[in-house]
Amino acid sequence: MITTAVLLGAGVGLGLWALLVWLLPPRPSLASALAAVRTTSQDRPTITAVDSGGWATRWGRPAVRPLRALGLPSERQRRDLLVLGRSPDTLLAEKAVLAVAGLLLPGLLQAMLWAAGVVFPWQVPFVVGVGCAMGGFLLPDLDVRQQAERKRTSFRHALSAYLNLVRVSLAGGAGVDGALNDAAAIGQGWAFARIRRALTTARLTRTTPWDTLRQLGEELDIRELVELSSSVSLAGTEGAKVRASLAAKAAAMRTHELTEAEGQAQAATERMSLPVICLFAGFLVFIAYPAMATVLGSL
C-alpha cells in the first residue's frame, strides 16, 4: 500500500507539474534573450528547405515548447534534420506523440483484457507503459540518425559525379561559375537539387558560389563538400588550376565508397552466420537434453 501510494503521488505530481509548465511557461532570462538575438542577427538563413507539416506536428504542438526548453533537439540532430529536410519542431512533436501513445497503449490493452475477464495488477501496465513511453520518445532519434546517414552516403555518391562534371566543364574552357552551374544543371536527384538551390541562392544574394557551397556542406555535415568549396575558391579568387585536384578528390571519394561498400558486405555476411550458430546451438541442446535428463534423474 505504501509503494502504491508513493507511485500514485509521484505520477499525479509529475502530471500537475507538466500541466503547470505548459500553461505558464517560464520566462527566459535576460542573458539568454540577448544571446538569442545576437545569434539570430549573425547567423545566415539556412539554404536547405525544411518541411514542418504532418499530423504528428499538429497533435504534438503543445509539447514542442517544453521540449525545446530542455535543450532538444541537439546540434547533431539539427544537422540530421536538415539533411532530411525536416524541421526540429516536427521531431519534437513526433517524440511527444509516440511517448504519449506508448504510455496509454498498455492501459488500453489492460482495459480490453479486463472486459474479457483477465485481470492484471495495475503495476504491470504502469511499468510497461513507462517503458513504451521511453521507447517511443527515443525511437524518432534513432530513425532520424539512420535516415540521415543513408542520405549523406547518397549525397557523397552524387558529389563524386558532380566533381567529374565540373572537371570536364573546366577542361572545356568554361569558367568556375559556369562549370559549377552547368554541372549542377546536368545531374538529377535530390543531391543535385540541393546544389542547384545553393548556387541559385548565391546568384540571388550576390555572393560567391563557393561560399554557399561551404555553407551547404556545413549544414549537411558533409566534409567533402566543404573541401570542394575551398578548392573552387582558390580557382575563383587566385586563378589556381584545380582540374587535377578535383580529379584526385573524385577518385579518392570513389575509393572510399568502394571500401565502405566492401565493409558493409562483410558485416552483412557475418550477421548471416549468426542464425546458423543459433540453430546449431539449439540442435546441440536438443541432442544433449535426453542424456542430461537421464543422468539427473538417476541421482
Image (spheres, helix red, strand yellow):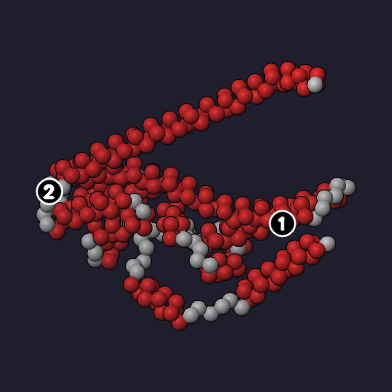
Position of 125 relative to 260 (above/below): below
Q: Is residue 180 left or right of residue 66?
A: left
Side (left or right) of 123 relative to 158: right
Residue sitting at x 75%, y 68%: 9
Crowdedness of circle 2 by 10 Å Cα count: few (<14), some, many (20+)? some
Q: Position of residue 211 (x, y in %)?
A: 25, 60
- Residue 90 lies, in percent from the top left, at 53, 60
Q: Is residue 237 above or below residue 170?
A: below
Instruction: Give the left or right position of residue 57, taking residue 260 as reference.
Output: right
Label located before the other in sequence (2 or 1):
1
Residue 94 is drawn in which quadrant?
A: bottom right
Residue denoted by label 2: 241
User: As rendered, which of 57 and 185 lies closer to the eye?
Assistant: 57
Q: How many marks?
A: 2
Q: Is residue 251 left or right of residue 272?
A: left
The residue identified by callout 1 is 104
Residue name at image x 44 percent, y 77 percent: 32
Q: Secondary structure at mark 2?
A: loop
Label 2 sits on what residue type? Lys
SS at circle 1 = helix
> In the picture, residue 200 is in which quadrant?
bottom left
Residue 55 seen in this snapshot = no
